[in-house]
Every structure is written in structure tokens, then in C-alpha cells.
Image (cartoon, helix red, strand yellow):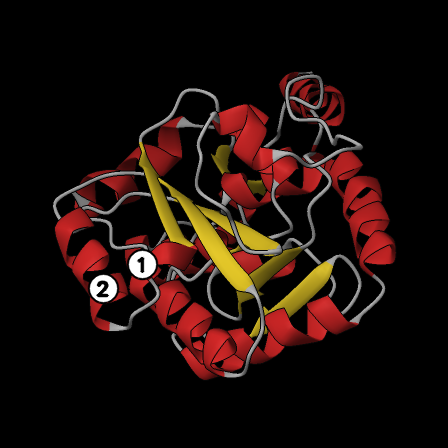
């Protein structure tokens, strides 16, 4: 496959990749010339993902469960092939609750590891603070009701769900690995933490709670304009021209 990729580059003017990190990986592993690669970060439909004034997640979900004051959200597969390491986020919630913070998390996603993650929440005695919703078609409606977005996947070429969260008016807390770390400026639209460390993730969550939330949310909304469909299509058209 790598040999095929190497030779096909000579038949194309440009090959689009979604981040600088992915570009470096393609050059290194597939020996494709850097000049053949064009970095175009993924885009998000800003008309679909929007912030709201009143966060009422319990009412929207129509549940009787009382959710924590600071309910974060994460979205991703619970499968084995693509492991988003949601267990890191769950463990971070445990760290924070042990410190007395009223923190919880909503998880949108499903897969073979769901039972393991549910059991982990039980073992850590925080199952009341973790709400697993499974696969949902209304994530764009759920996100704005949450406090912020946390991500714990060890590697993402880009991570489109993070810009969807930002478009929903949420600050984001993301790992310092892969292309996802380049989506934001640390301490501006959110925080960047040491990948695969629940302690580091918990520390950034605590820092966000203690910070000026509105400033981070506003910065996220400003930053995500760069990832809108309009600038993406404009760049794409110029590439064809």
C-alpha cells in the first residue's frame, strides 16, 4: 500500500491532508514529496453547531437524573480498533470528585468497550457522575448544554469534534499529541495537557473551572470561524484554479 501511495503521487498535482502533523507522517512513512501535499484543516458547519444562552441538559434529555454542576462532554468511539481512551477522561473525573468538585461527564458514543467503561465508573464509585448516551444523532443539540469539551484520544490527525464543540460555544481541553493540539492556543480557547495523563487532564479541568469561563467560550467562538465551511471552500476553489 505504501509503495502504491508512493507512485500515485506522480499522477496528482496535489494531495490534501488535514493537518501539518499528518503531512509530516505521510512524508515520513509513504515517502511522498512535501511539495505534493496541501494542508487543509477540516471544516465545521457553523449553522448547525451554535451556542445557547441557557444550558439545560437535563430538560433537553428529558431525564430525572441530577447532573453535576460542571458537566463536561466527550464524543467518540468505544471500539477497539480506534480507541479514544475515554477511560482517561473518566479517571480524571474521579480525581476531581475526590477533591470535592461537583464535576461530571456526558459521553456520546458506543462500541465494544462500553461495558468496560461503565464498569470502570462503577469501580471508581462515580457512576452517578458519568452519563453514557450511546450513539446520538443530536450531538449538535447536546453539546451547547454542556460546560466544556474534553478529549483524551492519544492521537488525532485533526479532531473535527473539537471544532464542533468550539462552534457550540465550549472551551476545549485537548492532549498535546497529534494534529489536534494545533487547533487552539493554550490558555486561550481552552487548555492543552500531557497526553494519557488523567492527573494532567484533571488539573486543566480544575483550572478552567477557576478561570473566566466566558472569556474562554468567546475565544473559542472567534477561533472556530477559521474552520468554517466558507473559508474551506474558498481555499479549495483556489486550489482547483
Secondary structure found at label 2: helix
The residue pinned by badge 1 equals 127
Could you tell me if the residues under marks 2 and 1 are in contact, i.e. CB atoms within 8 Å?
Answer: yes
Residue furthest front as drawn:
64
Crowding at mark 1 (Cα within 10 Å: few <14, some 14-19, many 20+): some
Which residue is drawn at the image coordinates 57% and 45% (left, top)?
162
Question: What mark, if any, has residue 33 been given in the picture?
Answer: none
Instruction: Give whichever of 101, 45 is nearer the camera.
Output: 101
Task: Classify 233 as above or below 167.
Answer: above
**In the rendered view, does 202 fall on the left or right side of 112?**
right
Q: Which mark is residue 122?
A: 2
Q: What element carries label 1?
A: helix
Image quadrant for the N terminus? top left
The answer to which of marks 2 and 1 sits earlier in the sequence is 2
Q: Residue 52 versus residue 171: which sits nearer the camera? A: 52
Q: Quadrant of residue 95?
A: bottom left
The answer to whether residue 220 of the structure is visible from this angle is yes
User: In this image, 117 relative to 155: left or right?
Assistant: left
Q: In this view, does 170 lie above or below 178?
A: above
Out of 74 and 59, give the one closest to the viewer.
59
Instruction: Name the residue: 30% across, 53% down.
Output: 30
Q: Can residue 37 be seen in this view?
A: no
Query: Residue 175, relative to residue 8: is it above or below?
Result: below
Q: Which residue is drawn at 30% across and 33% down?
A: 8
From the viewer's perspective, is 137 left or right of 170?
left
Q: Is residue 18 above or below residue 68?
A: above
CA separation in Å, label 2 and label 1? 5 Å
Residue 56, position as x, y percentages in the image = 64, 34
User: Could you classify mark 2 by the number of other residues whose Cα lies within 10 Å: few (under 14), some (14-19), or many (20 or more)?
Assistant: few
Across and down, in percent, residue 76 comes to 36, 44
Amino acid at each position: 500500500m505504501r509503495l502504491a501511495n508512493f507512485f500515485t503521487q506522480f499522477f496528482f498535482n496535489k494531495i490534501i491532508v488535514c493537518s501539518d502533523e499528518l503531512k509530516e507522517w505521510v512524508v515520513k512513512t509513504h515517502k511522498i514529496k512535501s511539495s505534493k501535499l496541501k494542508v487543509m484543516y477540516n471544516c465545521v458547519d457553523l449553522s448547525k453547531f451554535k451556542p445557547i444562552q441557557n444550558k439545560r441538559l437535563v430538560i433537553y434529555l428529558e431525564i430525572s437524573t441530577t447532573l453535576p454542576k460542571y458537566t463536561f462532554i466527550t464524543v467518540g468511539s468505544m471500539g477497539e480498533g480506534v480507541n479514544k481512551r475515554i477511560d482517561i477522561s473518566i479517571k480524571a473525573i474521579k480525581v476531581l470528585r475526590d477533591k470535592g468538585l461537583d464535576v461530571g461527564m456526558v459521553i456520546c458514543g458506543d462500541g465494544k468497550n462500553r461495558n468496560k467503561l461503565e464498569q470502570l465508573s462503577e469501580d471508581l464509585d462515580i457512576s452517578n457522575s458519568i452519563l453514557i448516551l450511546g450513539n446520538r444523532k443530536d450531538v449538535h443539540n447536546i453539546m451547547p448544554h454542556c460546560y466544556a469539551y474534553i478529549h483524551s484520544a492519544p492521537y488525532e490527525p485533526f479532531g473535527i469534534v473539537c471544532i464542533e464543540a468550539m462552534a457550540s460555544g465550549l472551551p476545549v481541553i485537548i492532549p498535546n499529541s497529534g494534529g489536534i493540539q494545533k487547533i487552539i492556543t493554550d490558555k486561550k480557547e481552552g487548555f492543552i495537557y500531557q497526553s494519557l495523563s488523567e492527573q494532567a487532564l484533571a488539573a486543566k479541568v480544575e483550572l478552567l473551572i477557576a478561570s473566566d469561563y466566558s472569556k474562554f467560550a468567546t475565544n473559542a467562538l472567534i477561533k472556530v470561524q477559521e474552520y468554517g465551511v466558507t473559508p474551506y471552500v474558498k481555499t479549495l476553489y483556489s486550489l482547483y484554479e
